[in-house]
Image (cartoon, rainbow, N blue to C red):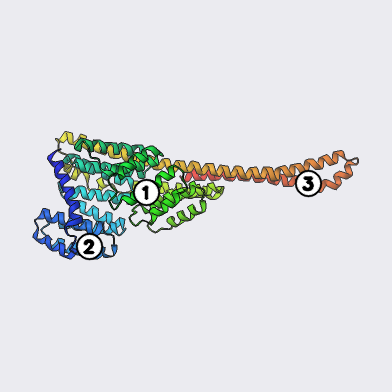
Amino acid sequence: MTTRTLKTLISLLFSLFFSLNLFADEGLSEKVKKLPHLPEAAAQELLYQLTQSYILKATDTTHISSDKKTLLTALAASNISDKKAFAYEIEGVAAKKLGNLDLAKHFILLALKKTSEGKPQLPRLLRMLAFIETDLENYMGAMETYLMVGKIFRKNHDTTLLVFNYNNIADLYIKNNLYDEAINALNEATALSLKQTKTFIPKTIYQNKAITYFYLQNLDSLQFYTQKVLKGEKGSPQYAIMKQRFRCMELLLKKDPTAIDSIKLVLKNFGNEDHYLTIIYLARAYLLFDKTSEAKELTFKLLASPNLKDPGYTRSILYELLGDAYQQEKNFKLSSSYYEKGLRQSFLNSKNIMKTGSILTFLKYDEIKNKYVIAEENLKARKNQFILSGIIAAMIIITLVLLYRSVRMKKKYNELMYSELNREISFINSHEVRRYLSNIKGIIMVIRMSKNKKKTYTELEEALFDSAENLDNSIKNIAIKLHDHTESTYQHTREH
């Protein structure tokens, strides 16, 4: 194990101990009094830990604003030289905690512009930006930022942090349904961990592997990695929630109806951070067991949430869920309508992502590339080209996934429209066309069998004319529906 890696591990353990135990019996106002008397490096570390404990990890958000002011006041009186960068970071973390993601991104970007080369704050800010981009469902921006963070960790030989960065990238892949890519990233993280420590692998890697294999519907692998996650965790605060979440996944793969009650139990747990995701799990469980009314009610409630991004990836998933629910109920008209809404969301979301400013552009890549490059000028150009190629490749992959989802929903929409049209035409054919045709054939048969055909024809002429006219109207009705379907499909294709 290298000296730098050892220092990183010691720093992580110290930070954990520091944030949980060091000032357990003091309030924030007492803790910040130490800041003016500390040298710069120690003051920065203390300020960061206090920001984490009292803002980012706070369970009661009512004190966020007052605690933020306390930290900013203490920062102003400290020996920290990069006061603006730290002030912006505190503002950004507070905005994220309060759910104002756009404002959080604004402050973190300002902090990045004020952070000079080689500062430990730089990768920390980039990681925070990636978390915010993920919450904003700007997955391309998040991927781009994680790749930049990874380059810094590789340059600094920080294997431990590089492992966690791969895990974050895998989490991003999972959110985009790129499960094979997620497994590859997690395998890379595993290999790095084993190379560094021979035996230790962070539990978060096992956790993401279990989740990925759930989506891949691999029950054996889910159970295998669940055991690894839970091993030795029985006394931890997160043990119960982790065990229950993995239990839900197992029951869903087994198609066990008790999965519904199991997921409800997770939703009641205060420690459940992925609240929206768990609700989507519950809606899918309702659909799996033909409880379409419950699935729709839950989905509509989630769609009405003011915190749901519009347009957004999650919103497109919810519309697709409603499409599935109405399809199970044989309501093809509403089903196709919601599939179309999901399709529009996907296209709008992709368009918005393409308009989003690149972090590389914002930070003026030509000015900051020296932060990440350690070789000679020619090697610099090749390495930067390689990194940019990697970023572009990752962005293309995510774009293709979004487009694939859109095309898949469009195909499902067109299939439903065709199915509905076919059902309507079949109804007209079986209930109207055949009836009027049978009437005509019956009248002709009566005329043929009559001894006085002329008299019989005169008596049945009006009935024969009515049946013929009704038959003509039914055929015209079919022609109109076919024409409307063709026009609708053409218009839908032009719009997208």
Mark 2 surroundings: few (<14), some (14-19) or many (≥20) residues within 10 A = some
Judged by depth in the image, the label closer to the viewer, 3 or 1, is: 1
Q: Secondary structure at mark 3?
A: helix
Q: Is residue 311 visible?
A: no
Q: Residue at x 26, y 50 (%)?
A: 129
Q: Which residue is mark 2?
A: 68
Q: Secondary structure at mark 2?
A: helix
| Residue that sits furthest to the right in the current view | 451
- Residue 43 percent across, percent down from the top left: 13, 56
How many numbered circles does the render carry?
Answer: 3
Q: Residue at x 36, y 38 (%)?
A: 221
Three-letter code for the amino acid on which mark 1 is drawn: Arg
Number of the label disc, if any, that sits on residue 465: 3
Left/right of residue 125 with respect to residue 297 in the rendered view: left
Q: Which residue is mark 1?
A: 245
- Residue 184 percent across, percent down from the top left: 31, 36
